[in-house]
Image (cartoon, rainbow, N blue to C red):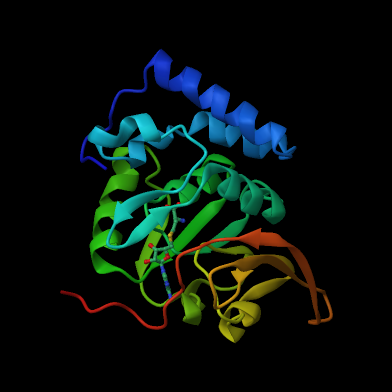
Amino acid sequence: MTTVRPADTYRHQGLRKLLVQKIKQKGITDQQVLAAMEAVPRHYFFDSSFLEYAYEDKPFPIGAGQTISQPYTVAFQTELLSIRKNEKVLEIGTGSGYQACILAEMGAKVFTIERQKTLFDRTSKFLSVVGYPTIKTFFGDGYKGLKAFAPFDKMIVTAAAPYIPDALLEQLKPGGILVIPVGANDVQTMTTITKNSDGTFEKKEFGAFRFVPMLEDKAKET
Ligand code: SAH
């Protein structure tokens, strides 16, 4: 990750097209998701010495023991969200900011929370540099949600949640969707929770994924 916007060359654009084709072959059909993934340069979120890894369908370390999710996983979670323009979306686990940019590219109003101060500081500055200044970043504990800006149309958790936090369910609009990988061990089950208009919830499960853990409370600000 750099402090200036890197170039987006024809080569990068070509590699991105190939990556999107691969994701399509793996079963992602939402055209808006595919278009956003083709539009957002994933190599912006990599250190210049690792650019060659940016267009592989793999997760990658981003520092502070965290990772940028695998492109297929980003596409899968985003597809489950069924984003419509101007929806208010809360992301837990800002990380590199890549997922937040995909959501913003699709026209969502994005609020994103990160518990690691170093990552929070770096990514908050970086989002303007890469052209997504409207994404609102927050340093905090995602288990608590973001009460001051609730309710949200959609919510996405990008870390492994040992359980579904009540605060997130409370801060979801009726008709809203929460996408969350649930599981305390090595593997999580991708889960969606839809809030019905009468306040009841519907749960669906979508197979196994691997995420870094969702940790309680903020990290120390050192
Ligand atoms: N969405 C990111 C990937 C995030 S990796 C991207 O596109 O790059 C998961 C992130 O969740 C890490 O940065 C980790 O620090 C953060 N995280 C873990 N527990 C959290 C919590 N309770 N609240 C907020 N962020 C959390």
Q: Position of residue 72 (x, y in %)?
A: 59, 44
- The answer to which image quadrant residue 182 occupies is bottom right
Badge count: 0
Does the rendering let one see residue 158?
Answer: yes
- The answer to which image quadrant residue 154 occupies is bottom right
Q: Residue at x 30, y 62 (%)?
A: 120
**In the image, is residue 70 above or below residue 49?**
below
Q: Quadrant of the C terminus?
A: bottom left
Q: Is residue 158 left or right of residue 113?
A: right
Q: Residue at x 45, y 48 (%)?
A: 59
* Residue lying at the far left of the rendered structure: 222
Q: Quadrant of the N terminus?
A: top left
* Residue lying at the far front of the rendered structure: 186
Q: Position of residue 162 (x, y in %)?
A: 56, 80
Q: Residue at x 40, y 43 (%)?
A: 132
- The answer to which image quadrant residue 10 occupies is top left
Q: Position of residue 3 (x, y in %)?
A: 20, 40
Q: Is residue 66 left or right of residue 154?
A: left
Q: Residue at x 41, y 58 (%)?
A: 136
**In the image, is residue 196 above or below residue 208?**
below
Q: Quadrant of ligand 1?
A: bottom left
Does the rendering let one see residue 180?
Answer: no
Between residue 133 and residue 60, name the one nearer to us.
Answer: 60
Q: Position of residue 27 (x, y in %)?
A: 74, 39
